[in-house]
Each structure stands twice: as C-alpha cells, then as structure tokens.
Image (cartoon, rainbow, N blue to C red):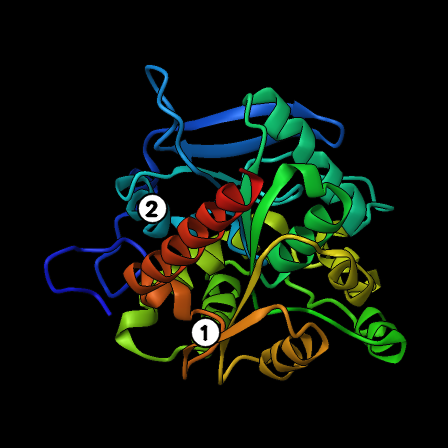
Amino acid sequence: MNDGKTRFAGVGEDWKGASALAGGKGYAQCRLGALHYRRLGRNADGERKKAILLLHQTPFGLAEWVDIQPLLAEMGFDTIAPDNPGYGMSDPPPESVTIADLADNLVDLLDGLNVERVAVAGHHTGAAIAASFAARHPDRTACVVLHGCPVYDAAGREKRLAQAAPQVYLREDGSHMSEIFSAIHSRAPIPRGLSTANWGTLGAWWAGFDTPTYKAVFANDMAADLDRISAPTRILTDRDDSLHEQDRQVAARRADFSLEVFSDGGSFSLMLDPRKWAERVAEFVSGAIAEGSAQSR
C-alpha cells in the first residue's frame, strides 16, 4: 500500500503524466533495432551496485516501473527498464520475432551499458522474456524473479494464437480511447487504479493490439526455458491474476524455485503496491547474490 507520505505516479487519481518518468532515459542499438530504456541508480566513482533488469507486461512499456524503479534505485540498486520492442519508444521487431530473439536482444543492451550480470525480473510478457534470458544466458544471470508466468501447453498456445486481436476504429468523439480505458480499468475498478489504467491505456494505444512481441508469448514454449534455468528463482503470484494457476504449476515443476503470493489482487497489483514489490524483490535479489558470492569463494 502507499505509505501515506509518498505520492506515487502509478497509483490513485493524481495523474502526473510523462514528468513522472524524467531522467535516465536513452537508446541502445540492438539486433532488433533501437531499444529505449530508463536507467536509474547506475554505478558511479568505482561503486559496484547490484543490477536489476526490469521487463514489463503488455501493454505498459517501461512505465509499469514508474514508481518501482526509483524505489529500487534509492535502495542502492542499478536498475535498467527497457521498453520491449514494439512498445513505448522502442523500434518494432519483425513479425517473425520469437521470445528467444527478444531475450538475446537484451544482451546487446547490457553490452552497450557495460553491465555484465543482472538480476532479471519480468512480469507476464516480461516473465517469458526473463525466463528465456536466464535459460539462454546463465553467465549473465545472477538470479530471476518471475511474476505471472505465461506457460501454455501446445493446445493452449494454439488457442491463444487463433484469437483475433481487438479492432479499434477512430471516432470523432474520442470514445475509442474511453473504451480502451474502461476495458483496462475493469481489471482494478477502484480509484487507486485510475492512474494505473491510464498508463496501460497509453501503452496499448501507442503500441497497437496485435504486436509481434505479444504474439511471440503465445508461440513460446516457456516450460522448456523454465527447465533450463540454473540461477536462484523466485515466483511471485497474485491470487486473482489469470496466470495464478500457471504460477503454482511452475513452482510445483521446479521445487528449487520459491513461490510467494504477492497479493490477493490481479495483474496490476505490483503497480498498486510498488513499495511492497520493491522491498520483496530487493530482499530476494540481495540474498541470492550474497549466497552466490559466498559459494564462489
């Protein structure tokens, strides 16, 4: 919950707009084109901070971390939040893009920023990319946080890929925007969810509803990536999230993964309670990296 002192930009009725994302932004030229990112808390004067790579859910873009990223930076982490290709201000990927391609694209980002190893944290779409990154690049992965795992069997993937994307038609009265907002806000229909829904509406309108990145999630066999992860991994889940059962199945599949119920809410819960999310992830990342350092001595 908001602590009553901090006025978060992704929570409540007080809309701050783009000013809430001031600072730390740049572009990295990657194999899938220009990747837009925001980096806060970076190393300076020889300081070596723990780096956390934050990968957003569809359709928010890096704005999903609008409140979480500054909190983690204040806690002493080097945080890097990219817009997934096709979202926010990043270049769109080719139609044939795969989750593996999106994971490999992040290596170019880290190389460009001179970051060797990261804790990688992903939410929904971001979780699929994070799992692939950890599976394909174990030498670059310190630990993993997966919040909402889009794991589907072959039949489930085929069904999701067959679903038609929403069609949006421009109307003179602007009601096309209000329809998008209403659909997104219905997932957390409370005053605290107004700013959250507005970020989602802007992200959806900017990206469109049938992006190659989003379709790649449903063509991806995430279970195969999960089986290959060797880094310490925490699963966060929300009881009212559409992926809650998949999260439980992932934890059962990998007994070495820890499972934590983050909330009783849905997929917007991390934005609605940014301090709790930052604190829980900071604790896990710090412990996992410390344990790894001790074992390497």
Residue 237 visible: yes
Where residue 271 appears, as percent x and y from the top left, is 38, 62
Give whichever of 229, 105 is nearer the camera.
Answer: 229
Determine the image quadrant of residue 14: bottom left
Where residue 49 appears, as percent x and y from the top left, is 39, 32
What residue appears at the point 63 percent right and 52 percent down from the top-left corner? 231
Mark 1 or 2, which is nearer the eye? 2
Q: CA distance from mark 1 to mark 2?
A: 31 Å
> Quick one: SS at disc 2?
helix
- Horizontal side of 102 relative to 11 (left or right) equals right
Query: In the rendered image of this protein, does residue 156 appear above or below residue 105?
Result: below
Q: Amino acid at mark 1?
A: Ser
Question: Within 10 angstroms of label 1, few (less than 14), some, or many (20 or more) residues?
Answer: some
Label 2 belongs to which residue?
72
Query: In the rendered image of this protein, does residue 286 appear above or below residue 158?
Result: above
Q: Amino acid at mark 2?
A: Leu
Where residue 60 appears, as percent x and y from the top left, is 51, 54
